[in-house]
Amino acid sequence: MAPGPQTTKIFAVVNRKGGVAKTTTAVALAHGLAMRLLQPAEDPPVRQTVSLNGQTLAVHGHVLLIDLDPQGNCATALGVRPDGADVADLLTGKQAITDSVISVDRSEDGLPRPNLWLLPASNRLADAKNELLIADFVKMMNNRGGRQGVPLLDVLHERLQVAIERFAYIIIDCPPTIDALSNAIYQFAQAAIVPVKVDYLSAAGTAQHVGDIRNAQMEGIEIAIHTILPTFYVKRQVLDQQIVEALQKTYGARRVAEPIPKNQVVAEAPAYLGGATIFEYAPDSPAAEAYWQLVERVFHG
């Protein structure tokens, strides 16, 4: 089955406030979409097929997770080593995309992910952003009309054009701060998913971040706010219920997703077998069920 009936395929998971489960959400969404794109194979098979748990499945698309946070936690969460692949080198033109993207399939460890890929980050990304910013400034100052490198605003689109053509979905784990790449991310992504920890300060910070996105929209950058995702939700807590209701009132009930419950298994998953997602560690947990609803929400537009 191809991606859902919508055309949106590039999602940025964003929030300038840390500790809101941003990376957890990006990893879970990317893995969930990859799982959603595996379906029982037709007879005879007409697509790439893989064998999982004794069943032959057709691969109806691949998913790319892009880590743009210098902490590089996506690789850790998935239990893989970048082995020299680094988004910093891709953005600065020192590495081709074929050398920057790695498979996160860990079938040998009992964690099969045949169609999930990662563009990993490291602390070198901070230096790369400075390099891109300086190059963009020099280009602007020279202003000779010639093409002297890729404009900073378009650097993601330029460097990732091949990925746009080859992946059914692209999920971006964004840094928790506003930096040199923020507008480039908004320019590249088609829609934003905003995790919000259900406490007062996080909700207030989300309003500021959504304001940044809307400012980008006013400047002609066409990124939509796809989903507000409440996280660390405790249903029996009255304040948590009130904050979710406030988010629904502010952004519209249809834009606010099913809250992700506060659950210890979410924190435990990355330690399982050296790095697992919630769907691998506790697939029947309330947190996994809530994240699967997010996957279906994105898949169906």
Image (tube, rainbow, N blue to C red):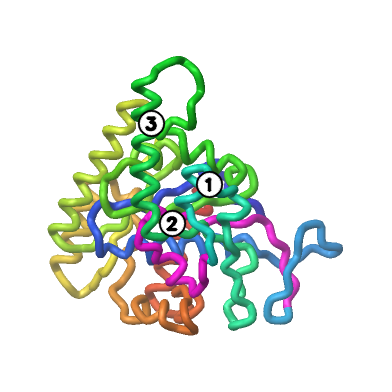
Residue at point 68%, 81% (across, down): 53
Residues at discs 3 and 2 in contact (Cβ within 8 Å)? no
* Chain-order first, disc 1 or disc 2: 2
Residue assigned mark 2: 67
Give x and y (percent) for residue 120: 48, 59
Closer mark to the observer between disc 1 and disc 2? 1
The correct choice, above or below, for 7 with respect to 85 in the image is above
Give x and y (percent) for residue 148: 48, 26
Residue at point 46%, 77% (across, down): 275
Residues at discs 1 and 3 in contact (Cβ within 8 Å)? no
* Chain-order first, disc 3 or disc 2: 2
Give x and y (percent) for residue 238: 14, 69
Residue assigned mark 3: 136
* Left/right of residue 40 with respect to residue 78 in the rendered view: right
* Chain-order first, disc 1 or disc 3: 1
Range shown magenta:
55-82
Q: CA distance from mark 1 to mark 2?
A: 17 Å
On residue 94, the disc is 1
- Other-residue count near label 3 (Cα within 10 Å), few / some / many at <14 / 14–19 / ≥20: some
User: Which secondary structure lies at badge 1?
Assistant: loop
Give x and y (percent) for residue 207: 20, 46
Location of residue 110 by image quarter: bottom right
* Left/right of residue 270 with respect to residue 100 in the rendered view: left
Q: Is residue 69 magenta?
A: yes
Residue at point 31%, 72% (across, down): 261
